[in-house]
Structure formats: structure tokens, C-alpha cells
Image (spheres, rainbow, N blue to C red):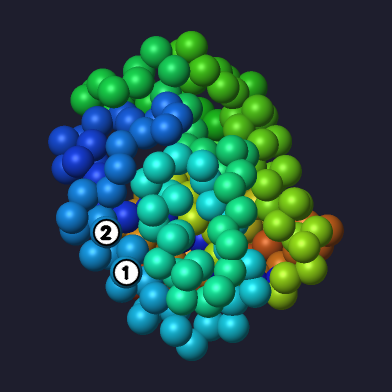
Amino acid sequence: MHLLLVRHGRTAANVDFLLDTAHPGSPLDAQGLAQAQALVTRLAGEPIEAIFTSDHTRARQTAAPLAASRGLSAVLHPGLREVQAGDLEMGVDWVPYVEVLAAWHHDATVRMPGSESGIEFLARYDAAISDLAATGAERAVVVSHGAAIRVWAAARCANLTREFLTRAHVPNTGVIRVIGSVYDGWQVESWDDLPLPPVAKTHL
């Protein structure tokens, strides 16, 4: 199965560097709407069979033009939401948030202040990917969020190294191409504009 993990388009909260993770979240700004429309052209050559999206407003808006262009109905799945910031919500200090995400590489039981643990996050994200796989689609788009995509890929894609992840940003409407299955595991084929990482196993 091929997964195209797509981060949502830009929002005003992105511009202001706010930890905007609660539902329904900020809508796309003008640039974000243009980025969503540009995905239609960028992915024109992909034989997409299904589109799953976080139920956050910005993710739904990002998926909408692509879904319309393919005659598909985007499936809203709350399991694809951003890593929830809890007590840090709408703050501008990202350090505690990022520290928890980093801690999940060693101990997924660590809990975001007032929010979920790494175990809980991965359980809901894995459930969404399993639901997508159950559709039988061979190539699908997953519209989600920057931290969520990074954390899930770090935990589930066998060829991502810690060193690669220190360089790996997920830009707005960046596309991470993943191949594999829920039974045999996953590998990253490409990470937006970064070259493929070497083969190595990394766990959260």
C-alpha cells in the first residue's frame, strides 16, 4: 500500500507560531487555500483511490479540492488529529511541547501536560491507518498535521534514523510518501524535498 501523508495548508496560527491543536482549530489563510488547490496539480499523476483526513478545519479544507477533482468523498477521522497540546494550547512557547515529543523516542508513556501520552497518540493514529487499509485502497492520501506525521513516521517507518528526523521538517502541504502495510510495517520512499534516509530501525 502507498500512503501519501500530507500536512495541511497554512493557517494564521502557523504564521503566529501558535500551538493550535484543539478541535476544530484555525481555518486556512489565503496562502493555505492556494496551497490546497496546488495539491491538485502536484498529485495529478497519482492514481489515488481514497482520501482520509483529520477532522480539523484546516485539514478538511486542504483535502477538499483534491477530493473534488477525483470525485472522491474525503473520510474524516479524528484519529488523524494533531498531537494535542493540552495545557500548552495556543501558547507560543514550543519548547515543552517539543521536549515531550522527543521524550517519546525513549518512553512513550510520557504525557503531554494535560493531554495524551505517546502510547495514546499512536493508538489513535494507528487505528486511523488501519481503517484506511481496510478500505482496500492501494494508494491513498492522508491529510494530517506536522507533529502527528513526524511522530507516527518515526515510530512506524523502519528506515528513519534519529539523525534524519533532526533535519526532517514537514512544510505546509508537504508530501511524505510511505509504502508498506499494517502487517509488515512501513518504509518512507520520499520526504518532501529531502533525500531518502538510510535503512535503519527507529522506535518511539
In the rendered structure, which amino acid carries the disc numbered 1?
A: Gln
Residue 108 visible in image:
no
Q: Secondary structure at mark 1?
A: helix
Task: Say if 35 sits above or below 81 in the image.
Answer: below
Left or right: where does residue 66 sit relative to residue 177? left
Task: Say if 14 sits above or below 10 in the image.
Answer: above
Task: Say if 196 sits above or below 76 in the image.
Answer: below
Residue at image x 59%, y 62%? 73
In the rendered structure, which amino acid carries the disc numbered 2?
A: Leu
Query: Gap between marks 1 and 2, in whole Å?
Result: 6 Å
Left or right: where does residue 79 sit relative to residue 195? right
Which numbered tag is attached to residue 33?
2
Residue 72 visible in image:
yes
Which numbered tag is attached to residue 37?
1
Horizontal and vertical percent for residue 36? 33, 63
Are circles 1 and 2 on residues that touch, CB within 8 Å? Answer: yes
